[in-house]
Image (cartoon, helix red, strand yellow):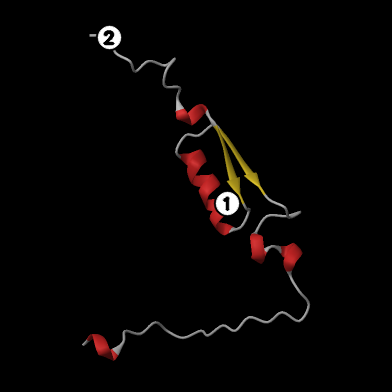
Amino acid sequence: MISTHSPETHPDPLLESVGVIGSGIAGLITAHILLQDGFKSVEVLTRDKSVGGVWSGARVYSGLHINRYVLPPRLSRLLF
């Protein structure tokens, strides 16, 4: 029986170029994981001048305030 699975018919997918659209946190993590998994050519595509997506330093708006509550984590009483 002749095997149909040869390097000529099934090239190594790790050698293919991969494009990640967006340089926000999800795009950066995706590119990092692809590189860790062995992909050789990973390119992050973005329209912005800097990475970071909506949290990029280039997108900091004057007067921007973020509501942040710093409370110790507690379990709901409904769980007991």
* Of 35 and 5, the residue lying toward us: 5
Q: How crowded is mark 2: few (under 14 residues within 10 Å), some or many (20 or more)?
A: few
Q: Can you identify the residue that label 1 sits on?
A: 28
Q: Can you identify the residue that label 2 sits on?
A: 2
> In the rendered structure, which amino acid carries the disc numbered 1?
Leu
Regarding mark 1 in the picture, which secondary structure is present there? Answer: helix
Q: Residue at x 53, y 85 (%)?
A: 69
Disc number lying in front (2 or 1): 2
Q: Give percent across and percent down for residue 34.
A: 49, 41
Say which quadrant the N terminus sits in: top left
Cα distance between the residues tagged 2 and 1: 43 Å
Which labelled disc corresponds to residue 16?
A: none
> In the rendered structure, which amino acid carries the disc numbered 2?
Ile
Q: Residue at x 35, y 85 (%)?
A: 74
Q: Give the side of residue 21 with respect to residue 13, left or right.
A: right
Residue placed farthest to the right in the image? 62
User: Is residue 34 positioned above or below 63 on the image?
Assistant: above
Q: Residue at x 45, y 22 (%)?
A: 11
